[in-house]
């Protein structure tokens, strides 16, 4: 028996969104590694500022090429909320990225889909079943296993990544609610403009003077900008094509990329608690995903 046309359309849109999300996570992971490399020879706030400046220039040129207005987006209250969440997410995540292991920071960030699905239920009216609520709770427990707040190995700096993931979840939800008339280039321009604001806030707080980066740091910074732009475009397409509760769990693929880069490039040690927590997080995300895209799940609302 053939599936109804609307189910076929939703399935195709979700699959395309999943592919875009996986591509975005791969490039975000490479961006993280290059950012961490640049931050080893430059001040964190300077890397944030230059990264935001480079990305905003790229998207600004894209707006000029498409002959789209630059300032019209500021008239949208949703864009103001999105920029505020972007500033919070980027500022705290980048500080965590520079000051804590890449693999740990990446693993903590994997709780973002849990918060996004929660926000989709609260703000977009997507119904969430009891089993999904249990999966969300398990995902949060997985993050606590990695953090281990009651152990001697707990680092308060890991809280920076937690604050960052909350900001990213708010950004993703606001991207979903942003007017469809706003193109990916407009969203990208204001997203990187928010990164400049985040770097400016950290610079004012630390009082660091801007210095010209070295050759090695410059190459790492250019690579960070390139990967960040590609990842940003892919992420926006994923969030605007597929259903939020279906597409966002595939952000967990970033864990695989981040762990591989952290292990092979930065020689980061991975404890049994890290693997256990990561397994719990990924399992909860996969459960949410399969419940959503299975034929049974497509035939009813959760």
Image (cartoon, helix red, strand yellow):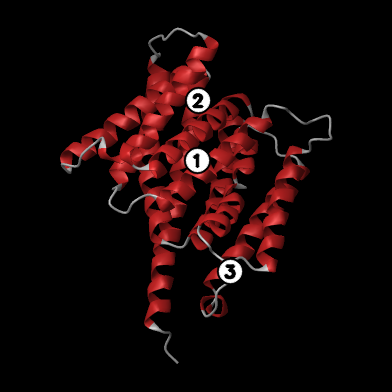
Residue assigned mark 2 = 37
Q: Which of the pair 270/180 is nearer the observer? A: 180
Which quadrant is home to the C terminus?
bottom right
Is 234 drawn above or below residue 2 in the view shown?
above
Which callout, 2 or 3, points at the residue further toward the start of the chain? 2
Q: Residues within 10 Å of mark 3 (few under 14, many from 20)?
A: some
Q: Which of the pair 250/188 is nearer the observer? A: 188
Q: Which of the pair 117/57 is nearer the observer? A: 117
Left or right of 111 in this view: 272:
right
Give me the residue at 44% from left, 65% from top: 14
Residue 145, position as x, y percentages in the image: 76, 44
Give me the residue at 55% from left, 32% from top: 93
CA distance for labels 2 and 1: 12 Å
Is residue 115 visible to the viewer in this orientation of the structure?
yes
Q: Secondary structure at mark 2?
A: helix
Residue assigned mark 3 = 290
Q: Residues within 10 Å of mark 2 (few under 14, many from 20)?
A: some
CA distance for labels 2 and 3: 36 Å
Left or right of 227 in this view: 164:
right
Which callout, 1 or 3, points at the residue further toward the start of the chain? 1
Which callout, 2 or 1, points at the residue further toward the start of the chain? 1
CA distance for labels 1 and 3: 24 Å
Which quadrant is home to the N terminus?
bottom left
Residue 29 numbered mark, or none: 1
Verify CB contact (< 8 Å) between mark 1 and mark 3. no
Q: Quadrant of residue 96?
A: top right
Residue 112, position as x, y percentages in the image: 58, 47
């Amino acid at each position: 028996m053939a599936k109804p046309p609307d189910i076929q359309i939703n399935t195709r849109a979700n699959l395309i969104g999943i592919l875009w999300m996986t591509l975005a996570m791969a490039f975000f992971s490479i961006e993280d590694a290059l950012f961490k490399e640049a931050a080893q020879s430059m001040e964190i706030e300077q890397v944030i500022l230059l990264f935001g400046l480079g990305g905003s220039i790229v998207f600004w040129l894209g707006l000029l090429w498409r002959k789209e207005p630059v300032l019209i987006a500021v008239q949208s209250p949703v864009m103001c909320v999105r920029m505020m969440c972007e500033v919070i997410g980027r500022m705290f995540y980048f500080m965590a990225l520079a000051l804590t292991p890449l693999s740990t920071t990446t693993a903590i960030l994997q709780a973002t889909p849990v918060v996004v699905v929660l926000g989709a239920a609260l703000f977009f009216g997507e119904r969430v079943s009891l089993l999904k609520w249990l999966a969300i709770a398990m995902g949060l427990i997985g993050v606590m296993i990695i953090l281990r707040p009651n152990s001697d190995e707990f680092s308060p700096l890991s809280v920076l990544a937690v604050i960052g993931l909350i900001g990213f979840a708010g950004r993703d939800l606001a991207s979903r609610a942003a007017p469809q008339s706003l193109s990916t280039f407009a969203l990208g321009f204001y997203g990187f403009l928010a990164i400049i604001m985040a770097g400016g806030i950290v610079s004012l707080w630390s009082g660091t003077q801007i210095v010209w980066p070295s050759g090695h740091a410059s190459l790492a910074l250019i690579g960070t900008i390139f990967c960040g732009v590609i990842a940003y475009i892919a992420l926006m397409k994923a969030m605007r094509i597929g259903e939020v509760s279906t597409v966002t769990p595939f952000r967990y693929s970033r864990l695989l990329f981040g762990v591989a880069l952290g292990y092979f490039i930065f020689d980061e040690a991975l404890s049994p608690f890290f693997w256990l927590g990561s397994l719990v997080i990924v399992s909860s995300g996969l459960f949410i995903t399969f419940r959503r895209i299975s034929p049974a799940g497509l035939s009813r609302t959760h």
